[in-house]
Image (cartoon, grey):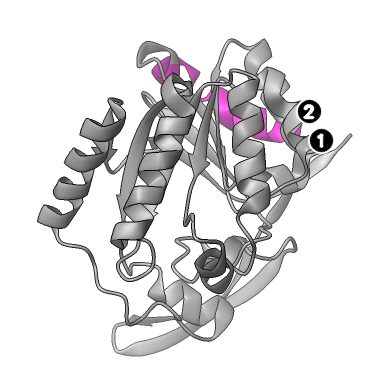
């Protein structure tokens, strides 16, 4: 029986696809985005951290394990607890991470099990994986939440550690296969919000046409700074400023009017 390495299962998620969802977080990711919300997902291995807590003037140090190997049935037992809420809200299950495609075999089995029980499935992915992984899971994914971090290859390398060429190749393949796709764009000031970045994104949306159902603009925030220091020893995105609400709305309006698809802030 195959097992997958996960680091969290979040119930009642409302920002990981339509409706109320259970989000399954896979551990392991090929990218190293400096602003990543989940730096504990980087390594595909169980890790231990030490948390310091204060209570009644005393300081306590607690060791915490991050990551757990689970079978498909163990995960399904957790998912089934909220199936009624997911069905009533037209929600379902979202596979996130990390990068779930790093564990394509386990992802395929888990997604197949969800589909077999009538649950809607989303894959939140960076798209950085071999095309064979996408081919395995395509029949079992109802909606792809596809991350586009930068369309400038040099900047993509600088801020994520990898080229974006494979990501774009896989996106175009999914479009060719008529998959349901929603783009997710983290808006990082100074990284991917320049005029040339927005023009490149507009060009991509024009190329995709109706194949892309919409765009989620995700404003940068620094809430993961502490986790970065715990798991990486530093927070490399510390100098990046949180984008203003007016800026996000301006970009949202621009993209929505250019591509004629729904564009939302958040998601």
* Vertical side of 128 occupied by 38: above or below: below
Q: Disc 2, disc 1: CB below 8 Å? A: yes
The answer to whether residue 219 is visible is yes
Report the label total.
Answer: 2
Dividing the picture into quadrants, the one containing residue 13 is top left
Residue tagged 2? 136
Residue sitting at x 40%, y 19%: 85
* Vertical side of 86 occupied by 17: above or below: below
Residue tagged 1? 132
Q: Quadrant of the C terminus?
A: top left
Q: Which contiguous range is marked in magenta?
A: 71-86
Residue sitting at x 52%, y 79%: 230
Of helix, strand and loop, which one carries label 2?
Answer: helix
Q: CA distance from mark 2 to mark 1?
A: 6 Å
Rate crowding at label 1 as few (under 14), some (14 to 19) or many (20 or more) other CA atoms within 10 Å.
Answer: few
Residue 126 falls left or right of residue 74: left
Q: Is residue 81 on the magenta stretch?
A: yes
Q: Position of residue 132 (x, y in %)?
A: 81, 35
Q: Position of residue 32 (x, y in %)?
A: 59, 67
Residue 259 falls left or right of residue 75: left
Q: Position of residue 234 (x, y in %)?
A: 49, 85
Question: In the orientation shown, which residue stands out farthest toward the right?
Answer: 1
Residue sitting at x 76%, y 44%: 103
Residue sitting at x 30%, y 67%: 189
Main SS class of the magenta portion in the image: helix
Mark sitting on residue 94: none
Q: Is residue 79 on the magenta stretch?
A: yes
């Amino acid at each position: 029986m195959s097992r997958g390495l996960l680091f969290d299962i979040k119930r009642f998620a409302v920002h990981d696809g339509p409706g109320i969802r259970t989000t399954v977080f896979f551990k392991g990711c090929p990218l190293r985005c400096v602003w990543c919300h989940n730096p504990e997902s980087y390594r595909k291995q169980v890790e231990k951290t030490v948390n310091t807590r204060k209570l009644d003037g005393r300081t306590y140090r607690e060791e915490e394990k991050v990551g757990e190997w689970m079978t498909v049935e163990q995960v399904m037992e957790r998912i089934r607890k909220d199936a009624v809420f997911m069905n009533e809200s037209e929600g379902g299950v979202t596979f996130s991470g990390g990068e779930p495609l790093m564990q394509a075999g386990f992802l395929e089995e888990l997604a197949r099990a969800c589909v077999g029980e009538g649950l809607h499935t989303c894959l939140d992915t960076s798209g950085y994986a071999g095309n064979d992984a996408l081919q395995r899971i395509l029949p079992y994914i109802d909606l792809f939440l596809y991350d586009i971090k930068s369309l400038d290859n040099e900047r993509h390398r600088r801020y994520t550690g990898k080229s974006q060429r494979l990501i774009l190749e896989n996106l175009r393949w999914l479009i060719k296969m008529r998959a349901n796709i929603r783009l997710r764009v983290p808006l990082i000031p100074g990284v991917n919000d320049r005029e040339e970045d927005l023009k490149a994104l507009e060009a991509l949306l024009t190329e995709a046409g109706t194949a892309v159902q919409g765009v989620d603009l995700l404003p940068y925030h620094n809430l993961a700074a502490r986790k970065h220091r715990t798991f990486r020893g530093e927070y490399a995105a510390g100098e990046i400023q949180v984008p203003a609400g007016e800026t996000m709305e301006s970009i949202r309006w621009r993209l929505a009017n250019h591509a004629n698809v729904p564009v939302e802030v958040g998601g």
